[in-house]
Each structure stands twice: as structure tokens, then as C-alpha cells.
Image (cartoon, rainbow, N blue to C red):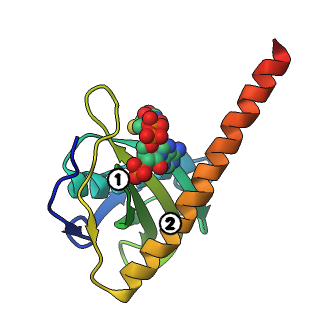
Amino acid sequence: MKRPSHEKTVSDSESEMVQLVLPNDTNLLGNLLGGTLMHWIDLAGAVVANRHCRQAIVTASMDGLDFLAPIPLGSLVILQGKLKHVGSSSMEVGVQVYSENPLSGKRRQTSTATLCYVAVDKQGKPLPVPRLLLTSDQEKRDFEAAIQRKEARLLRLQQKSLRQKTSKREAE
Ligand SMILES: CC(C)(COP(=O)(O)OP(=O)(O)OC[C@H]1O[C@@H](n2cnc3c(N)ncnc32)[C@H](O)[C@@H]1OP(=O)(O)O)[C@@H](O)C(=O)NCCC(=O)NCCS
């Protein structure tokens, strides 16, 4: 299928999601569960990718996820996602996570994450997505840095698949 002819900017899909940490979301220390935060990060990133391509998407990878500080029960969690790179069918989204004290309004950054989504058809086959129109020097720097990450990711995937083939052959 042909790539859509229209281009879209980073701000066309930039999104913010806010969650409240409830008792069911916490561990024994009363802090947000890591798995729940990963789920929210995935959703926040998926909203961005979907708004860019307006097609069904799947999460292809999540890397560079850091948990910098615990998020206590009752906090607001702010997840800000924006596109860093768009390839033929893949979209890399950076998600910044902040916790906010609902009484004082004090905010601190607690996580950063980088995720890749791929637009797919009903059979799960990759589909072309609109090009990303870069409108600032920062967006151009982000795009270049994401290309390096994409190359490293693809190399890691190739090496993994090679290792799997080798160990399968050895097991036979
Ligand atoms: C992601 C997926 C669609 C890629 O399919 P594929 O047939 O390997 O596709 P290709 O090798 O042609 O690559 C298509 C694009 O995906 C990107 N891609 C593939 N695997 C990737 C990975 N692990 N991480 C990041 N990007 C990846 C490629 O770089 C390529 O990008 P480009 O078109 O912008 O250059 C496929 O691996 C898949 O369906 N994975 C499972 C997804 C899933 O179930 N997620 C969890 C639930 S949403």
C-alpha cells in the first residue's frame, strides 16, 4: 500500500494523559506498581501513535524505561507523549512521566520511556504511515537520535534471531 501523501507535525499527535493512583494500583509499600505504570505508559504512547496514523497499531518495543522515583498512593500521574521518529510503518514515541501531589501541586519527573508502534492491517501486516514534518531544531535533533536507536534496535533483533537459530540447530 502507498504511503499517505499528507505530512503531520509532532504537535498534531502530542498528548497528555492523567491518572490517579488508587489503592488497587499499589504495592505493599503503598506505591504505584511498576507493571501498572508500564501499562499506562504503553497507552499514553499508543494514543500518540494512533493520532499520527489513524490506523490500528501494535506495540513493537519498549526500551529505555527508567523508574526514577516511587509514586505514592493518591498521587496524580501525568504522562506526556510525543513522536520522536516516523519510519515507513513504525513510530517512535517518547513518554515522560511526572507525579503530582494533588494537594500541593508539586510535580516531579519519575520516569522516561521510549516505545515503538507499528501501524498494521487486519492481518497484522505493517502499513505505511504519514511522514513526520519537523518544525524545530529540537525535533530534528530528536529525529536524528531516534535513527541511531532504530539502527541499534534492529541490530539487536538480528543478533537475537541469529542466536535463536544457532541454539535451535544445536538442540536438533
Ligand atoms: C511489530 C510487527 C508488526 C513487525 O512486523 P514485521 O513483519 O517484523 O515487520 P517488518 O520487519 O517489515 O518491519 C516493519 C516496521 O516495524 C519495525 N519493527 C519491527 N520490529 C520492531 C521492534 N521489535 N521494535 C521496533 N520496531 C520494530 C521495523 O523497523 C519497520 O519499521 P519501518 O517500516 O518504519 O522501517 C510484528 O513483529 C508484530 O506483530 N509483533 C507483535 C506485536 C504485538 O503483539 N504487540 C503487543 C500487543 S499490541
State left or right for residue 166 relative to residue 6.
right
Q: Is mark 1 within 8 Å of ligand 1?
A: yes
Observer-nearest of 23 and 35? 35
Q: Is residue 15 visible to the viewer in this orientation of the structure?
A: yes
Which residue corresponds to the image point at 49% horizontal and 60% vertical from the top-left? Answer: 114
Which residue corresponds to the image point at 56% horizontal and 51% vertical from the top-left? Answer: 34
Q: Residue furthest top?
A: 172
Alpha-carbon span between mark 1 and mark 2: 13 Å
Image quarter of residue 10: bottom left
x and y, in percent, of residue 147 in the image: 50, 66
State left or right for residue 98 relative to residue 19.
right
What residue is disc 2 on?
A: 147
User: What numbered label is drawn on residue 88?
Assistant: 1
Quarter of the image that includes the N terminus: top left
x and y, in percent, of residue 54 in the image: 19, 49
Observer-nearest of 109 and 81? 81
Which quadrant does ligand 1 occupy? top left
